[in-house]
Image (tube, rainbow, N blue to C red):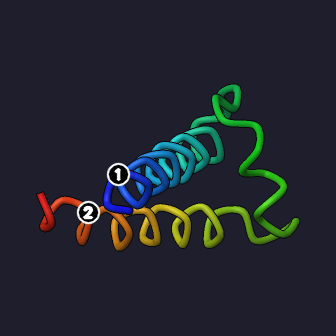
């Protein structure tokens, strides 16, 4: 279970971070699936939520070992 939380947290951290960078810098999107998770018009807030959610999932996985 801890590895699954770690992997999911890692993917959400990378997806949210790359979404924020692409939104701010105008680059290409590395993780295209995250645009389906974020509603149109709320990209910045949605990517930030994904980033925070990823960190919150990764913390318990890191604490367990």
Residue drawn at (24%, 71%), measured in percent from left and top? 60
- Residue closer to the observer: 13 or 24: 13
Q: Is residue 5 left or right of residue 60?
A: right
Crowding near the residue tagged with mark 1, few <14, some 14–19, many ≥20 C-alpha atoms within 10 Å: few
Instruction: State the SS at label 1.
Output: helix
Image mark for residue 61: 2
Q: Residue furthest front?
A: 1
**Quadrant of image for the N terminus:** bottom left
Residue 37 location in percent, x, y? 77, 62
Q: Is residue 39 left or right of residue 34?
A: right
2 lies above or below 17: below
- Residue closer to the observer: 27 or 2: 2
Are the residues at dot 1 and dot 2 in contact (C-beta closer than 8 Å)? yes
**Quadrant of image for the C terminus:** bottom left
49 lies above or below 2: below
Residue 34 location in percent, x, y? 71, 51
Residue drawn at (44%, 54%), measured in percent from left and top? 4
Residue, disc 1: 3
Residue 50 location in percent, x, y? 55, 65
Residue drawn at (54%, 53%), measured in percent from left and top? 16
Q: Is residue 59 left or right of residue 5?
A: left
Instruction: State the SS at label 2.
Output: helix
């Amino acid at each position: 279970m801890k590895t699954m939380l770690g992997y999911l947290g890692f993917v959400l951290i990378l997806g949210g971070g790359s979404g924020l960078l692409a939104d701010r810098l105008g680059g290409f999107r590395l993780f295209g699936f995250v645009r389906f998770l974020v509603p149109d018009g709320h990209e910045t807030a949605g990517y930030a939520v994904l980033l925070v959610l990823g960190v919150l999932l990764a913390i318990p996985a890191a604490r367990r070992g």
